[in-house]
Image: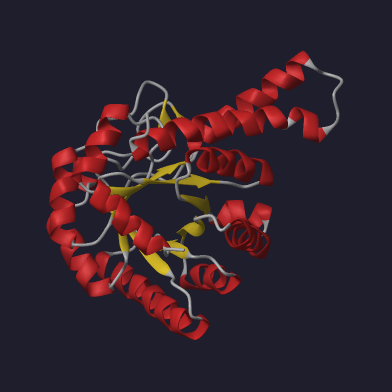
Amino acid sequence: MKTLYEFIKEAEEKKIAIGHFNISNIEALHGIYNAAKKLGVPVIIGVSEGEEEFIGKKEVAALIKEIRENDKYPIFLNADHHYSFESVKNALDAGYDAAIIDAVKLPLEENIILTKKCVEYAKELSLKEGREILIEAELGFIGQSSKLLDVIPEGISEATMTKPEDAKYFAEQTGINLIAPSVGNVHGMIKGGNPRLDIERIKNIREACGIPMVLHGGSGIADEDFVNAIQAGISIVHINTEIRVAYKEALEKYLKENPNEVAPYKFLKGGVDAIESVVEARLRLFSGIK
């Protein structure tokens, strides 16, 4: 089986993108994996610090490894938005395939030092265990919440978007494998509609930094922007809030219609199906599948 990085480079060459979807329970994993298998495309499962605390760091790593090895399927696990070297190290030690060190709140040079430390550890562990481990970092500010929002979070503006020259410098100084820029994207979903992406900025950043790019805050972005962003250089797209909303609404609907039901496998199934539906639609768009 090809490595995650090989799948990323293949997606870049084909001008498509790999879907990255977050989970915090087994139902979400089932929904995402069902959709990916239906279409036969690789998929990345993301688990943030809070999500992995709930589902279990070692448990989710074991689940993904078991699926990949038993089914011979390209499913990978990413430590999404980890904020310290220790949290990144712990995730990689548990068997994660990749990690995002999020140090955007630090001054640039401090961000570089922390990110470089994570990159160096990933290289050491890769050699020791004979497996590929990728490190991603975010540059520019896009907020931190994966929920429905009334307005764009404070601190997000054109001034906080990623500059191509900064991305180039950051990539060269840290040695990261992937970069997640701020290009008009926002974590969470804006109720009145998400802002449009700066497609030209995406293209310029990709040309400047020379490494694959990841679009965070994909929930709520217009289909046209997704397509154009992928053509401009985005190779991975993160979706979280959309599937959380779909899951919650499906559960609420079932329990409202069946108030006396207490069997989890019955009232949770609708949530699995709802997630699968959202993920399939997104994977079709990202992969160019009609």
Task: Tell me the quadrant of the picture where the C terminus can be found.
Answer: top left
Residue at the image point whose x is 65% and y is 31% from the top? 271
Residue 287 vertical placement versus 220 (above, below): below
Residue 189 in sight from this viewpoint: yes
So how many labels did they put on this image?
A: 0
Q: Is residue 148 visible?
A: no
Q: Residue at x 59, y 28 (%)?
A: 274
Q: Is residue 124 left or right of residue 24?
A: left
Residue at left 59%, top 51%? Answer: 51
State the colouring used for the structure image.
secondary structure
In which quarter of the view is residue 198 placed? Answer: top left
Q: Which of the 4 image quadrants contains residue 175?
A: bottom left
Tell me residue 247's x, y (percent). Answer: 61, 31
Q: Position of residue 136 (x, y in %)?
A: 36, 62
Instruction: Answer left or right for 265 relative to 160.
Output: right
Q: Most extreme residue toward the top, as rendered?
A: 257
Position in image of residue 18 (x %, y %): 39, 47
Q: Position of residue 66 (x, y in %)?
A: 64, 61
Of residues 147 and 79, which is closer to you in this image? 79
Question: Observer-nearest residue: 278 or 251?
Answer: 278
136 to the left or right of 240: left
Image side of residue 147 versus residue 70, left or right:
left
